[in-house]
Amino acid sequence: MNSSLFSKTLNEDSYSEYIEKIINVFRLSSKESSILLALTIKDYTCVIKLSIIGQNGEKEEFCDTTFKCDEVFYKNFLDVLVEKFTENVTVTTKDIVDLDDDPSLVTFRLITINNDLVSIDGLTNDHAKYLLSLIEGERKDKLLASSNNNVGAANLNIFLLVLVIVIIFFIVLFLMT
């Protein structure tokens, strides 16, 4: 089956809608199938291939989508896609690999808990490292927020414990007199 994920013309105004549709596909992920999202950047264009492969080998492919690659594409689409993807999907592995003979270009990959794959091929090493830093920054923010929440809860529990001990101490002191 070769269906379209997007029905209208893709441009800067529709980037966020397209990103949301991609993330919605990954939200439907399960252990019974693998979702493959491959972005290939070459000659100032980006071709996006999205497919779902079932355990039985059956493959559903969506029509390829092509974007013009410029600064707006990188800033408003690619960077946002990686950030929103990692916010909404559990990523277990992220790496940068050199899959071809061009030493100046690399592939940035994300693998999810359900063994889905996002690969972005044709990035400069600097931009791939930038995408990795976006994810690491997001992860650190989540860990910091979670640890701050735990510290607040721990402080409250310690305060209550001390308060109970002080009350018990005064009750015992009152009973002894």
Image (tube, helix red, strand yellow):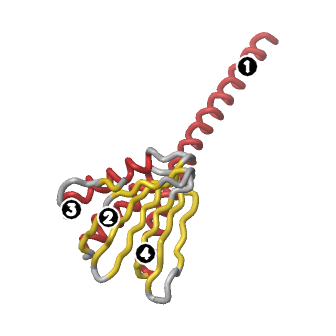
Give amino acid for label 3: Leu
Residue type at mark 1: give it. Answer: Ile
**Residues at circles 1 and 2 in contact by the CB criterion of under 8 Å:** no
Location of mark 2 (residue): 64
**Mark 3 crowdedness (10 Å alpha carbons): few <14, some 14-19, many ≥20:** some
Question: Reading the chain from its start, which is encountered first: label 1 or label 2?
Answer: 2
Quadrant of residue 158 within the rendered picture: top right
Q: Are marks 2 and 3 in contact (CB under 8 Å)?
A: no
| Above or below, 68 relative to 85 | below
Can you tell which quarter of the image residue 161 is in?
A: top right
According to the picture, the residue beneath numbered tag 4 turns out to be 121
- Residue at the spot of label 1: 168
Q: Earlier in the sequence, mark 2 or mark 3?
A: 3
Q: Is residue 107 left or right of residue 84?
A: right
Q: Which of marks 4 and 2 is in front?
A: 2
Q: What residue type is labelled 2?
A: Asp
Residue occupying image coordinates x 46% and y 55%: 59
**Residue linked to disc 3:** 10
Q: 67 or 81, which lies in front? A: 67
* Nearer mark to the viewer, of 1 and 2: 2
Q: Which amino acid type is shown beneath numbered disc 4?
A: Asp
Which numbered disc, 1 or 3, marks the residue that appears first in the sequence? Answer: 3
Q: Around disc 2, counting alpha carbons within 10 Å, would you say few (fewer than 14), some (14 to 19), or many (20 or more)?
A: some
| Residues at marks 1 and 3, CA–CA distance in whole angstroms | 69 Å
Q: Where is residue 41 in the image (x, y as percent from the top left)?
A: 35, 76
Q: Residue 89 carries which label?
A: none
**Distance CA(mark 1)–CA(mark 4):** 66 Å
- Rate crowding at label 4 as few (under 14), some (14 to 19) or many (20 or more) other CA atoms within 10 Å: many
